Amino acid sequence: MAPLTSHFKRALVAFIALLGMLTLYKYSRDASADLVAPPRSLPIDVDEIGRNATIPNNGLQRAAMVALVRNSELQGIRSTVRQMDDRFNNKYGYPYIFLNDEDFTEEFKEGIRTLTTAPVYFGKLSTEHWGLSPYVTEEKVQEALKLNQNRYMYGGSYSYRLMCRYQSGFVYKHELLKDLDYYWRIEPDVNYYCDIPYDPFKYMKDNKLIYGFTITPMEKLETVETLWETTRKWMIANPDYLQEKSFIHWVVNEKSVYTRCHFWSNFEIVDLSFYRSEAYESYFQHLDRAGGFFYERWGDAPVHSMAASILLRKEQIHWFEDIGYRHPGIGHCPTKPEMAVRCVCPANANYMQRSLCNRRYGEVNNIYKHQALELAEMPDKQ
């Protein structure tokens, strides 16, 4: 074979170099597309799937972040999702589930889809779960709304009561949550101050935890005037649902007075087997029949907290002290140096340092079942 000419050699080298550049360009475009946006087949609506698509196949827990949110709250929930991804979920890719009593708009869906590479699901609440309790009357509810309108926040709000009842007894029954073992409740317009270098869902599972929280305020008495009275009647009627020990002393003192301490449920990480249990369902149905979600303003936070304290032991409940968090009105940031180093907090995010309920959480312990029943049987001293 005749030797290659110098001109031909240069042409061959140039051609090979050009081919390599084109291949590299195509690879980089494909890789960039995978990183920037999720495939359009991932974010789907509940009516587009035959079964819950949130079952993980990548070693993660059966878990998701869940928000009950309106179309008008798009920017607030976008802020939350961005922080969740930045602080935690960009390392794991847990799904986000958004629920609404109305159809989500395309603007809302696209506003979420373009923000995260995690799977995203949108669901609508059933009319069976979102609405007036069958145990109350419209006339009496309207009377209660008028009476309480100026007594406390949301005193005259019908929709707020629908939300509290739904979060107390129905959110975990939604089709999109049916295959989940854990959920992390998220809300619009909140702040996450700290990097989370581990998987809280796995932490819950590994440590046999049932309920996780960050902030413990005290409920306004006027909103829960008969909650403990109603609860103790359920305890007396259903002693078999109680464990041999429980953390009831956190919500009720030794004189059977309701402390009004509660876990602020706008942040909660929960083993959903608890809410799905026969004991919790019985308790919720008892409360629903009493009418306090509408005639008073029983919130899901005091309801969840009362149930957790009565039905669980202290060691099944966990304070996520290391997760700095703020919901409008109250903020928490860790002060321990090994936790604070991962956080960027405003100066006033120190509620848990002065929280009386947090102090009580550290001081009281489990009591035995017979002692819990004795508290329930004491005359009401509220």
Image (cartoon, rainbow, N blue to C red):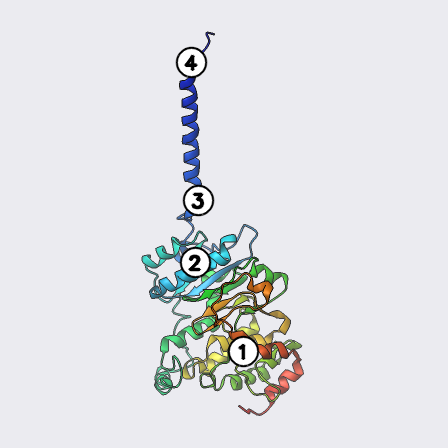
Which one is nearer the viewer's eye here, 353 or 67? 353
Residue bearing mark 4:
6
| Mark 2 or mark 4: whose residue is earlier in sequence | 4
Residue type at mark 4 is: Ser
The residue most toward the front is 347
Q: Earlier in the sequence, mark 4 or mark 1?
A: 4
Q: Residue at x 51, y 66 (%)?
A: 324
Alpha-carbon span between mark 3 and mark 4: 43 Å
Residue 227's spot in the image, x, y percent? Answer: 50, 83
Point out residue 175 in the picture as x, y percentages from the top left corner.
Answer: 45, 62
Question: Closer to the observer: label 3 or label 1?
Answer: 1
Q: Mark 2: which amino acid?
A: Arg
Q: Which residue is mark 2?
A: 82
Count every numbered label the image shows and give the total. 4
Q: Amino acid at mark 3?
A: Asp
Q: Which residue is mark 1?
A: 354
Of residues 239 and 61, the one drawn nearer to the viewer in this rendering: 61
User: Are the residues at dot 2 and dot 4 in contact (C-beta closer than 8 Å)?
Assistant: no
- How many other residues sit within 10 Å of disc 3, few (<14), some (14-19) or many (≥20)? few
Circle 1: element type: helix
- Work out whether mark 3 precedes mark 4 in sequence or the reverse, and give the earlier one: 4
Q: Nearer the viewer, mark 3 or mark 4?
A: 4
- Give amino acid for label 1: Arg
| 1 or 2: mark nearer the eye | 1
Q: Is residue 75 above or below residue 352?
A: above
Q: Is residue 105 left or right of residue 365?
A: left
Distance between the alpha carbons at the discs numbered 4 and 1: 83 Å
Q: In this figure, which residue is indicated by the disc labeled 3?
A: 34
Cα separation between marks 1 and 2: 30 Å
Q: CA distance from mark 2 to mark 4?
A: 58 Å
The residue depicted at 59 percent of the width and 87 percent of the height is: 256
